[in-house]
Amino acid sequence: MNYYTDKEYYHCKPISSIGAKQEGRSVQMEDEVVRIRDILKNHPKGMTIEEISRLLPLNRTSTAKYLNTLLISGQAEMRTYGRAKVFSLTQRVPLSRLMSLSSDLILILDKEETVTYINDGFLKFLDVERDNLAGKKIGQTSLPQYLSPGILTGIDRALEGRESSGEQDIRIRGQDFYFITKLIPMVFDEGSGGVAIILEDITELKKYQRHLENLVEERTREIIATNEQLEKEIAEHRKVRESLEVVNNKLNLLASVTRHDILNQITAISGYIQILNEELSGDLKISGYIKKVEDAITTIQQEIIFTRDYKDLGIKPPEWQLVKDVVTKAYETRPLKSATIDIGTGNLAVFADPFLEKVFVNIFENTFRHDGNVTEIKISFTAHGKFGVLVIEDNGKGVPKTLKPHLFEYGSGKNKFNLFLSQEILSITGISISENGIPGKGARFEILLPEGTWNTGKKEGS
């Protein structure tokens, strides 16, 4: 049993008396806060503590305490001008008005998980009346059947001050809806905690996403089917190509053997013709016939050699070739002992058939065979925008005007086949050749290189 001295008893007051006094102070505080808020409402430019305390009237300390309550609850704001502090009401739009305009579904609970606000969008979505939800604990309403367990768990975390978000789907009235959910901690005006549950409708986005996924799956199936069909066709084409290669190899082998046999027979005929010519050298008429036979044999030899070269044209893919190396090799193949050569092409590379060397061999052959006056050959290159011109010119007697129009035709002139073959080799990669020299001043072969077939910075194979 506890005992009190007279002095202790005198100062001891009943609990009910203390509670009543605290409740009275709380009511007085609310009244003073309301009065300060009314004063600030009539002075939108703001007021100092001294100005407010004079109007209440209250002492400066009490006024500052009530103003601090308004600041904490967000109902007032303070600006500093030098040493003076000026207070004014916060310019706010009513929260309920903002939430009613939002397209999101918004639900606000207090710290007891009681529904304090639900916006019109939420009510319309659930097709319920506000009176069926407002003022009730969330567990006592129909809301839990629509909200996922994750949201219900998140309410407790939000009341502890931790924000969370996620996705959830809701099936209502036979339809599926999809939302991004946010649980945001909040503080009411009087300072107590709560939580705002915001559901952002992403149903149309989800439908479009699924539509795209289905579209991708459908296109993927089509691509797979197309690829399978292409693979079958490629396999069939490969078989056809392999069969053609076998046939071509056999034909080439036959042609090669035949050419070899024909050339052997021509050699034999040439021998007999030579013996016959010696035996009948005194008969000028017979010698004339023999000369025509020899010319015919020479033509046959040239045609057979031409078919040997032409059959291999275009078999191997084009490649980058350094012009100065190709020209040097071609000149060594068909040297002009009486002529010097000047190669001024630098690092010019040309994208052409591997037979490119044959082009220069044929040109040099043409010079060697038909123009014994050549002492200088010059190879040069000039760029003209996207095109390039490779020039091979000499100081001989040139090409007669009568031969120029038919110079590159099959079997034309004394050369017969060489220049035609050169033209065919170059045309594989779109390159063309012409002769533009002045008769009496030397031949001038111009090779026109279109864009993509030449460069001056890459070497062979680059």
Image (cartoon, rainbow, N blue to C red):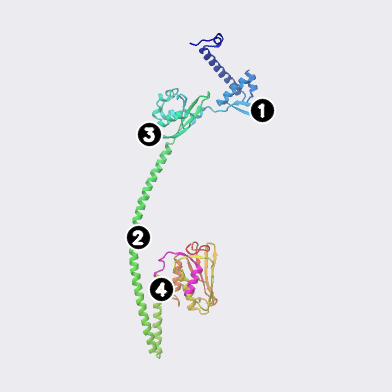
At label 2, which amino acid type do we have?
A: Arg
Foreground: 86 or 392? 86
Task: Tell me, for residue 115, which label it has, or none.
Answer: none
Location of residue 388 in the rendering, given as x and y in whole percent from the top left corner: 52, 65
**Residue visible at 34% across and 68% down in the picture:** 249
Task: Tell me, for residue 238, which label it has, or none.
Answer: 2
> Of circles 1 and 4, which is in front?
1
At label 3, which amino acid type do we have?
A: Gln
SS label for mark 3: strand
Task: Say whether residue 57 is left or right of residue 289.
Answer: right
Quarter holding residue 385: bottom right
> Of circles 2 and 3, which is in front?
2
For residue 26, above or below residue 282: above
Q: Name the residue under label 3.
A: 175
- N-terminal of the pair, mark 4 or mark 2, is 2
SS label for mark 1: loop
- N-terminal of the pair, mark 2 or mark 3, is 3
Q: Name the residue under label 4.
A: 306
SS label for mark 4: helix
Question: Gap in Å between the C-alphas at discs 1 and 4?
Answer: 108 Å
Residue 283 is a magenta residue: no
